[in-house]
Amino acid sequence: MRKTLIILFMISLFGINSSKANINIAYEYSFKDLDGEEIKLSDFKNKVIVITNVASKCGFTSQYEDLQTIWEKYQEKGLVVIGVPSSSFNQEFQTNEEVKNFCEAKFGISFPMTQKEEVRGSNAHPFYKWAKETYGSKSVPKWNFHKIIVDKNGKVFDTFASMTNPTSNKFIKVIEKALSQ
């Protein structure tokens, strides 16, 4: 009895942070696409989602082509690719329309693209704040074309820095592992 009272006292003294005890999942977040329509991550339950912050004027911009390649190859197996144009590194066009025109004309992008969002700091989109809170600093983009892989349960499965190409063996192995679970 005494041990129970001590435990109850400790819990009341230090409390239980219910927001940490019940960590939310990626499905709670949404973006607006380049046309202003909502992209709900909850629409992709039981799928693997690759969310990549992108920029049209970056040395890694050719990765658009590789993101499109994996989208086409793995879409039927349950993969969703979402591009998040970002001015966090000052390498994106000014307007969403310019981003859309560039991506469609230069790379034939057909995977979902969001409106421009901040991906770092206090003004970051809530998804990116959540990723940092639940997965740590590895989920914070250090540059454009940082990739966050969300598993079929809505949790961060892995992350990849800009240097990792989406069609590299290393990246593909992780995608295939996530799809198989």
Image (cartoon, helix red, strand yellow):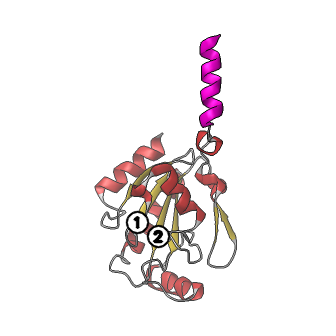
Quadrant, the N terminus: top right
**Which amino acid is tagged 1?**
His
Q: Is residue 68 inside the magenta stretch?
A: no
Disc 2 element: strand
Residue highlighted by disc 2: 53
Residue highlighted by disc 1: 146
The reply, left or right, for residue 114 in relation to residue 137 is right
Task: Kindly report the distance in space between the C-alpha atoms of the residues bearing marks 1 and 2.
Answer: 6 Å
**Which amino acid is tagged 2?**
Asn
Disc 1 element: loop
Q: Is residue 14 inside the magenta stretch?
A: yes
Residue nearest the observer in this picture, 172 or 23: 23
* Residue extent of the magenta highlight: 1-15
Across and down, in percent, residue 103 comes to 49, 81
The reply, left or right, for residue 168 in relation to residue 67 is left
Across and down, in percent, residue 53 comes to 47, 70
Residue 147 lies, with reference to residue 95, above or below; the image says: above
| Occupied quadrant, residue 59 | bottom left
The reply, left or right, for residue 43 in relation to residue 81 is right
Residue nearest the observer in this picture, 29 or 43: 29
Prevailing secondary structure of the magenta residues? helix
Residue depicted at 46% across the width and 55% down the height: 149
Across and down, in percent, residue 71 comes to 48, 63
Residue 106 lies, with reference to residue 109, above or below; the image says: below
| Occupied quadrant, residue 43 | bottom right
Residue nearest the observer in this picture, 25 or 73: 25
